[in-house]
Image (cartoon, helix red, strand yellow):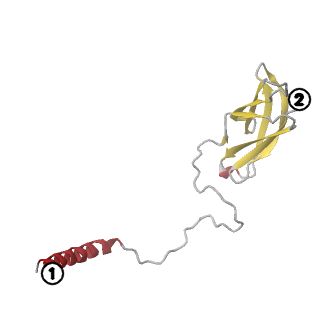
C-alpha cells in the first residue's frame, strides 16, 4: 500500500506542476521581426551595435612583418557609417605636424581596413596612426617596424 500511496503522491505533484507551468507555454506562431538582419549572402554580422565609439582599432599596437612592405590594420566602425570615408594619417610623434603617410579607408559592415606602406618607416621606431571622420581624430594605434637582423 505504501508503494501505491507514494506513486499517487508523485502523480499528484506532477499533475499540479504541469498545470502550474502550462501558463508559461506560448503556442502563438512566430512572426518575423521588422528590421531583422536577413542573412542572404552567408556573411556573419554583429547583431547589436555594442561599440559606442564611431571608430576603434582592434588593438593598441600593430607590428609590421619583416620583409613585407604593406601592413593591414583593421578596426571597428559604427555600422550606421556605412561607406563613409575614414581618413587616416601616419605620423612620427616627435614631428606631429609632418604626415609620413595618409589615405582613405571605407567603413563597410561595421569594419574598416587601413593599408600602410612600411618601407618608409625606420626600424624599431614607434609611429602613430590616427583615423577619423572629416579630419576629427577618433581612433589611434601605435605602429612599429622591427629591424631585420
Number of marks: 2
Q: Residue at x 25, y 75 (%)?
A: 14
Q: Secondary structure at mark 1?
A: helix
| Residue 55 image offset from top left, x and y in percent | 67, 41
Place residue 117 in its image quadrant: top right
Vertical order, 124 against 140 (above or below): above
Q: Assign the N terminus to one quadrant of the image.
A: bottom left
Q: Secondary structure at mark 2?
A: loop
Q: Nearer the viewer, residue 88 or 23?
A: 23
| Residue 47 image offset from top left, x and y in percent | 59, 57
Within 10 angstroms of label 1, few (less than 14), some, or many (20 or more) residues? Answer: few
Vertical order, 137 against 17 (above or below): above
On the image, numbered disc 2 is attached to which residue? 120
Vertical order, 40 against 115 (above or below): below
In the figure, is residue 107 to the left or right of 99? left
Q: Assign the C terminus to one quadrant of the image.
A: top right
Q: Identify the disc placed on residue 22.
A: none
Question: Which label lies toward us, 2 or 1?
Answer: 1
Place residue 73 in its image quadrant: top right
Outermost residue, top direction?
94
In the figure, is residue 13 to the left or right of 143? left
Q: Residue at x 66, y 59 (%)?
A: 44
Q: Nearer the viewer, residue 84 or 66?
A: 66
Q: Residue at x 15, y 81 (%)?
A: 4
| Residue 17 image offset from top left, x and y in percent | 25, 72
Outermost residue, left direction?
1
On the image, numbered disc 1 is attached to which residue? 4
Q: Residue at x 41, y 78 (%)?
A: 27
Sequence-first disc among 2 and 1:
1
Q: Nearer the viewer, residue 73 or 12?
A: 12
In the figure, is residue 32 to the left or right of 116? left
Amino acid at each position: 500500500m505504501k508503494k501505491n500511496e507514494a506513486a499517487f503522491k508523485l502523480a499528484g505533484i506532477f499533475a499540479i506542476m504541469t498545470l502550474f507551468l502550462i501558463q508559461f507555454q506560448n503556442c502563438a506562431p512566430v512572426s518575423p521581426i521588422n528590421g531583422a538582419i536577413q542573412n542572404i549572402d552567408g556573411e556573419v554580422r554583429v547583431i547589436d551595435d555594442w561599440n559606442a565609439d564611431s571608430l576603434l582599432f582592434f588593438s593598441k599596437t600593430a607590428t609590421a612583418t619583416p620583409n613585407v612592405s604593406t601592413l593591414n590594420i583593421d578596426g571597428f566602425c559604427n555600422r550606421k557609417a556605412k561607406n563613409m570615408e575614414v581618413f587616416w594619417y601616419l605620423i612620427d610623434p616627435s614631428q606631429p605636424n609632418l604626415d609620413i603617410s595618409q589615405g582613405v579607408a571605407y567603413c563597410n559592415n561595421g569594419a574598416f581596413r587601413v593599408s600602410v606602406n612600411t618601407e618608409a618607416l625606420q626600424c624599431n621606431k614607434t609611429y602613430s596612426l590616427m583615423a577619423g571622420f572629416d579630419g576629427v581624430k577618433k581612433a589611434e594605434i601605435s605602429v612599429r617596424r622591427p629591424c631585420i637582423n
